[in-house]
Amino acid sequence: MRIAFYDTKPYDRVWFDRLSPEFGFSIQYIEERISVDNCVLAEGCDAVCVFVNDHVDATVLQKLHEIGVRALLLRCTGYNNVEFREAFGKIHVMRVPAYSPYAVAEYSCALLLSVNRKTHRAYSRTRDYNFSINGLMGTDLHGKTAGVIGTGKIGRIMAGILKGFGMRVIAYDPYPPKDPDFEMVDLEQIWKQSDVISLHCPLTPETTHLVNHDTLLKMKDDVILINSSRGALIDTTALIDAVKNRKVGGVGLDVYEEEDDYFFEDRSNDILEDEELVRLMSFPNVLVTSHQAFFTAEAMEAIARTSLENMDRFRKDVYLENEICYRCGKEGVCDRDNKRENCF
Ligand code: NAI
């Protein structure tokens, strides 16, 4: 079986090349992101493998279907970049539901610690032999309140790490976990009580611009915001205003609303045209990184293995546990024949 692998980076090949012989798949690596114009490169392939910033819309899905592609392997957790309902009856969409929630939670924490204690600025200073610590004061996290939004795999680990710092953790999730060892509250309480807010929910119509002008106003002064989930959870214009107005004490972003044109690419020779991204990066208390929270050796290996196992299950015609339901968007509720009815 052949897999057309879009948006290939050197680090993807390390793990996919290492593991694919075990499964006997042949992989055709393509550097470009998928688009309707380059779908044709997948001709003769049984599956297409894509990443977070590949937009698989209805036209792309239709085109892939026409050229005989039968499976779409998302080598990521989120699937907001796929119009999966359009795949109904055409292409099976599978994802990697968890590769290393620890990688993302630990990285979110790294962002929090850097933003709070300004290690990113200290690093630049000392490299320039500037050993002054003026302006680098942070606060103790111990005893402060952290608000975690989304208590799935990553959010729960994040909550545990924050508790390890001696923080009080409060959390919001419309589908709260059973027996959480932190306090579940409503969103209003998250905005009102938190000194640190960390976002760990998926991007959906309900969560788009969850952090906006109104919710920012409800937050405590000097709140620290961390987002390693999806950029559009935050209204960037409103965030920039809040930073300019000194409402927000610090921001750590591993994702950005309009990241598609920039993140994962070397744009250091270009004139950046995204004014909001440039403005964000101009603030001393905002740290932006390029969607790297997942990027550990363990996570990369797990991504490659699960993607290849997904394809293997498809080849063997067995139940696809990581398939996204075409109807409701939840996973594990569809079968190969699309006969499940309990997804409504
Ligand atoms: P998960 O599916 O285990 O947990 C998500 C949680 O969010 C669930 O408990 C769900 O009930 C909750 N949720 C749904 N709607 C909500 C709402 N309106 N408000 C609050 N909570 C809501 O997902 P996981 O693995 O914890 O991942 C969380 C997010 O992290 C993903 O959706 C993805 O966007 C992002 N992510 C980012 C990575 C990075 O490298 N920066 C890597 C992996 C994931």
Image (cartoon, rainbow, N blue to C red):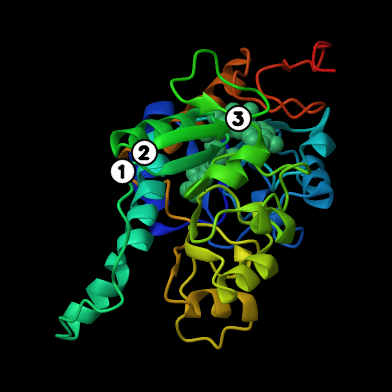
Is 341 situated above or below 33? above
**Alpha carbons under labels 3 and 2: distance apart:** 16 Å
Q: Residues within 10 Å of mark 3 (few under 14, many from 20)?
A: some
Residue 83 visible in image: yes
- The mark nearer the N terminus, 3 or 2, is 2
Image location (x, y in percent) of residue 259: 60, 64
Does the CB distance between marks 2 and 1 fall below 8 Å? yes
The residue where tag 1 is placed is 142
Does the CB distance between marks 1 and 3 fall below 8 Å? no
Amino acid at the residue labelled 1: His
Is 266 situated above or below 177? below
Residue 94 visible in image: no
Find residue 126 and report its image quarter: bottom left
Is 97 situated above or below 334? below
Amino acid at the residue labelled 2: Met
Amino acid at the residue labelled 3: Val
Q: Quadrant of the N terminus?
A: top right
Question: In the structure shown, which secondary structural element does the residue marked by tag 3 occupy?
Answer: loop
The residue where tag 3 is placed is 185
Image location (x, y in percent) of residue 99: 44, 33
Image location (x, y in percent) of residue 328: 79, 26
**Alpha carbons under labels 2 and 1: distance apart:** 5 Å
The residue where tag 2 is placed is 167
Find residue 300 and report its image quarter: top left
- The mark nearer the N terminus, 1 or 3, is 1
Q: Which mark is residue 263?
A: none
